[in-house]
Amino acid sequence: MPETERYKFFSHTACEFYPCHDMPEGELNCLFCFCPLYCLGSECGGNFRYVGERGDTKDCSACTVPHRRENYDYIMAQFERVKAIASEQRG
């Protein structure tokens, strides 16, 4: 990673849940630990499934999209969509 792009990656190895996904050591990006794209539902672009009695609970435990170093720009590019959802909810 170029010296000028270190802000795109953070690995919190001292976290009590680390590693939370089955990924090679040093590749798990914790910057987006709680995925900012969750609110996009089925349009988030990740590997998720719906579970629960009614099938309406989004389970992202198998998804590594926000944790992959190469997906930083993808995540950041989705914030206009996230902002639109937040604006709708605000009324």
Image: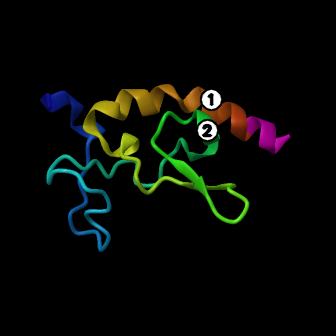
The label shown at residue 69 is none
Residue 6 percent coordinates (x, y) = 21, 37
Which residues are the magenta region? 87-91
Q: Is residue 4 above or below residue 16?
A: above
Amino acid at pointer 2: Ser
Magenta stretch, main secondary structure, is: helix
Packing grade of label 1 (10 A; few <14, some 14-19, many >=20) is some
Say which quadrant the N terminus sits in: top left
Q: Quadrant of residue 39?
A: top right
- Tell me the SS state at disc 1: helix
In terms of depth relative to the viewer, which is nearer, 52 or 39?
52
Amino acid at pointer 1: Arg
Q: Is residue 51 left or right of residue 8?
A: right
Q: Is residue 2 left or right of residue 89?
A: left
In terms of depth relative to the viewer, which is nearer, 53 or 9?
53
Q: Is residue 50 above or below residue 1?
A: below
Task: Tell me which numbered mark, 1 or 2, is placed earlier along the sequence.
Answer: 2
Residue 34 percent coordinates (x, y) = 47, 54
Magenta stretch contains residue 50: no
Closest to the camera, between mark 1 and mark 2, is 2
Say how many tags the image has: 2
In 3D space, how far apart are the residues under numbered discs 1 and 2 (Cα atoms)?
A: 13 Å
Point 48% across, 48% down: residue: 35
Q: Is residue 62 left or right of residue 41?
A: left
Magenta stretch contains residue 88: yes
Mark 2, residue position: 42
Mark 1, residue position: 81
Say which quadrant the C terminus sits in: top right
Residue 70 percent coordinates (x, y) = 28, 31
Residue 65 percent coordinates (x, y) = 38, 40
Point 34% across, 32% down: residue: 71
